[in-house]
Amino acid sequence: MSLRTSRPARAGQYLALLCYLVFLAFPFLWLISTAFKPAPELGSLHPTWIPDSPTLENFRQAFDEQPLLRAAGNSLTVALSAALIAVVIATPMAYVMARQRGRLATAATGWVVVSQAFPFVLVIIPLFLVLKNLHLINSLFGLIMVYVVWSLPFALWMLVGYVRAVPAELEEAAAVDGAGRLRTLVSVTAPLLAPGIVATAMFAFVTAWNEFFFALVLLKSPEKQTLPVILTHFLGAEGVADLGPLAAAAFLATLPSLAIFAIIQRRITGGMLAGAVKT
């Protein structure tokens, strides 16, 4: 009887998951379709999923109209730097929070939660003033620092879950064998944390790669603008979009994030579950 009951429930779960996946995939599939459509099909009153005459003209126009390669280089520099710095800072902090029980760990956990509640609009003005006093406006380094601070709470939350998933008995056993604290961390704990560090770094990278608001406000020089900001240049003065090149450029900008998630999806899922259960 229970088996008969579980089968309809499981079928319902799979159906709900399928509907959710279709809901998530629809914008991306439509983006791909639009990127390969010629101009006459883009203005058609009866749009189709599959272009009747696929073309690469939109991609050519996108590269001719905007400096996509330079903007992608800026985004890559900012995202890689922010991810690396965030992980380097968050890893020792996460270890202390996971292993030490006390007011400091409690306060740090509260900071992680509270920091995620502030919307961008509330912090952009004081942030702009601080960076202006430090002469970091219109600077990739200033944008990197902003991304590090913004991604640090989530990176810390993920890594705390990974550290708590590592049994403390392993470190105690290494100490009994004569290994010092540094040797234990390097030889025992660090290898077990490697998947979590990779997953956290990838999350920080994708967050910085896709971020738009801070880059729009803080970067003024065209040669320093990142890829999400450059995409807005395909909009005309009256808000009319150059739809074909915009779709082509947006499709290319999405590929790095998709590739990263496809490569490390299992590690990302494990990191999220560990953080949710262990913290």
Image (cartoon, helix red, strand yellow):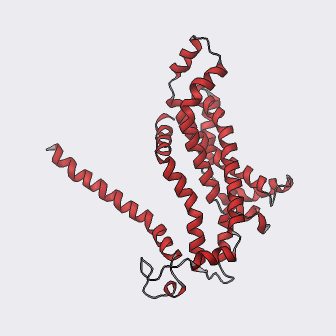
**Residue occupying image coordinates x 71% and y 54%:** 77
> Residue 25: x percent and y percent?
44, 64
Q: Does residue 118 appear left or right of residue 52 in this picture?
A: right
Q: Does residue 224 appear left or right of residue 102 in this picture?
A: right
> Residue 81: x percent and y percent?
70, 48
Q: 130 above or below 84?
A: below
Q: 159 above or below 5?
A: above
Q: Nearer the viewer, residue 255 or 235?
A: 255
Write down the quadrant of residue 76 in the picture: bottom right
Q: 175 above or below 26?
A: above
Q: Nearer the viewer, residue 40 or 152?
A: 40
**Residue occupying image coordinates x 69% and y 82%:** 237
**Residue occupying image coordinates x 55% and y 61%:** 255
**Residue occupying image coordinates x 52% and y 30%:** 164
Q: Does residue 127 appear left or right of residue 134 in this picture?
A: left
Considering every residue shown, the one lying at the far left of the view is 1
> Residue 84: x percent and y percent?
67, 44
